[in-house]
Image (cartoon, helix red, strand yellow):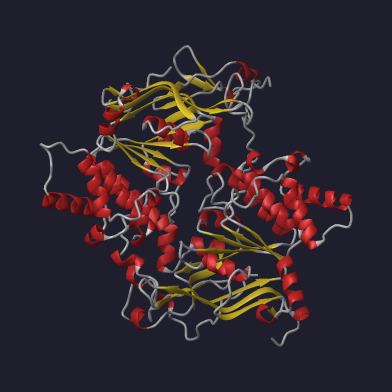
Amino acid sequence: MTNETNKTNGQTPVLTVNDLRVYYETPRGDVRAVDGINFTLNEGVILGLVGESGCGKSTAAMGILQLITPPGRIVSGEIVLDGTDVLKLTTEGLRQLRWSKLALIPQGAMNSLNPTMRISRQIEDVVREHETPQTRMNKDAMRTRILELLQWVGLPERVYNMFPHELSGGMKQRACIAMAIALNPSVIIADESTSALDVVVQRVVAQTMLKVKQQLGVSMIMIGHDMGLMAQMVDRIVVMYAGNIVEIATVNHMFKNPGHPYTQLLIDSVPSLKERKPLKITEGITHDPRNPPPGCIFQLRCPFVMDRCRAEKPLRQAIRPGQEVACHLYEAQPDGSYIDLREVSDVHDA
Amino acid sequence: MSTTPKQSKMLLEIRNATKVYTQRAFGGGTRQVVALQDFNLNIPKHPATITTIAGESGSGKSTLANLVLGFTGISRGQIIYDGLDMATATPAQNIQYRRDVQAVFQDPFGVYNPFYRIQHVFDLVIRNFKLAESKAAARDMIEESLNVVGLYGEDVLRKYPHQLSGGQRQRIMMARAYMVKPKLIVADEPVSMVDASLRAAILDVMMRLRDNGISFLYITHDLSTAYQIGDQIFILYQGTIAETGSTIDVIDKPHHPYVQLLVNSVPVPDPDIQWEGTIELPADEEMRTSQQAGCRFYPRCPHRMERCLSAAPRLYPVGKNGHVASCFLYDRYDEAVEAPQQTT
């Protein structure tokens, strides 16, 4: 369906997701939370995963981490991390993989710390869990390592002995980042990790995450819905709608020439601090997630819907280098370029 | 107050409002936390306006909402509604106040009883405030309220809360508040839990209700939505006003160092405009509850002076239409203003 791998400056892929499907079982049929998504994460890249609540972005991340619990289940797919198919791993293999290769900064990281344990102890747990008798650190080495991690994320030394309730939201968030980078993972998944913070604190946490990317070369998947923050932090953006990927593009394309009508709507809905504009209101009619309509997933809300959209599901195609869109509005020409049907007159047969 | 209710030009006046919470400290003893200090605000009767209270968590903005809504008692100062000090109100006046001042809260998922249909939300209000004489009148009233917030048809009334999106639920809360025909709606972070693409619909309802003569006290941490709809803005920092004035003036030309930092930190949805420089939070950021003598922003301020340690700055004029900032950098006039002026 896509030929993503050979793109983006020839970097090597660290994570490839092929046709991942995650369904939730309900009495009246399966809810297709993630319905066949494909993407590649390259080394040293921050990939933003955006979409409205319920579009499946968090479920996709949980699927990659193998943290789906019933009634949810992974129906099909392939998740290749550094050459290993994560879905074929045993429980023990998964345990070894988590934190060491694939780390998570959870949604509301501030509430995911254990309130009864000091910060130092919680970071130590992560490291000890993955030690072998050969690599076992002694107490002093461990203390030095933890202090180094805290300093790295900009936390003072005294945090070592503190409990989570003694830290502010931004400090807890950074403690979680310290934990995530403790074992030098290849990929970090950050699920809405700055959305509950004030803008100033959010900026400090965002800076810390950018430092992780630049200095440690870690790849990240950042899930969120703040398009402003995405513009500041990420390299590529994946836009999801109702369990499907509708567009993947570099951050520049995404903000300068959004391709998919849904992406255009997302970008338009960001309130500006520079000028007062009339508010753009969009109604959120969506289909029943148990029973998606044939054709395009966005047809009920799309202002440009055509007959073809109701019959045939659009495939994702690269309309220009670095931008893939799943939309019938873009028609391939014999020379390999694409035209936007809205720019050609008399196309609305709907 | 010497003024009688009928003469007051102000809908709501807040005079030197201070709220001190007493915390029981670990191992006995108590600790005083000043959540809001000497806060002043005027909301005129005409025309209706949207007044924004912005600030980070812990700045006192929700405390202010709770004081206005009467959820918590005031420590010092007055809340004067239509010329009447609410501390001296009779029970009948209190009931009228609770009718005139309605609330919309942050969480559109937690305010509904999941076992009742949406119809029940409206029925309760009509019954409690005895709004309608007959069933037909009640139906008309509900329909009018739904139309104001952009919802049509009776379908929505038969639905259960879980069948609606966050944006729809929040609009129904606005419709519920509107039905009582209030003078003022206190909206505490009404859009922060609603999806970005659906926020515009709620902001639009707020503007439409304002044009229908209902004022808003809009409490938020999001400057960009305030910039789109707000008239007057108050930016709070640790319980005190950092800067206030008309929203456009304050955000276009911020003067207080904190407000400058705040405006600069809002992520711009344009990859070509990146944040300028890096910022550090001071290590003792969390030690903020003690009442200091000087400016509360001193530990973080890039322009701090010796003077800032000894006394807290008053509000100094920095622009037109009552644009004032509490910072000694602007102490170049002889007379300092006592309270923020109205922008209207």
Question: Which quadrant: the C terminus of chain A?
Answer: top right
**Horizontal and vertical percent position of residue B259:** 44, 64
Kindly give the residue lying farthest to the top in the view shown: A334
Number of numbered discs:
0
* Horizontal side of residue B322 vs A235, given as left or right: right
Q: Judge from the rendering whether residue B268 lies leftward or rightward of residue A139; answer left or right.
A: right
* Residue at 34% from the left image edge and 30% from the top image edge: A41
Residue beneath the point at 44% across and 73% down: B23
* A161 left or right of B37 in image: left
Nearer to us in this view, A222 or B177: B177
Q: Is residue B200 visible?
A: yes
User: In which quadrant of the rendered image does the N terminus of chain A lie?
Assistant: top left
Q: Residue furthest front?
A: B27
Q: Is residue A182 visible?
A: no
The percent coordinates of residue A137 (x first, y second) are 12, 45
Query: Which residue is at the front of the view, A306 or A58?
Result: A58
Relative to A286, residue B211 above or below: below
B335 sits to left or right of B291? right
Determine whether A19 is above or below A197 in the image: above
Tell me where residue B241 appears, x and y as whole percent: 49, 72
* Residue depicted at x 30% and y 64%: B282
Q: Is residue B105 above or below residue A102?
A: below
Q: Which of the 4 image quadrants contains residue B293?
A: bottom left
Image x and y of residue B72, in percent: 58, 71
Nearer the observer, A347 or A201: A201
Q: Give whichever of B79, B296 is nearer the camera.
A: B79
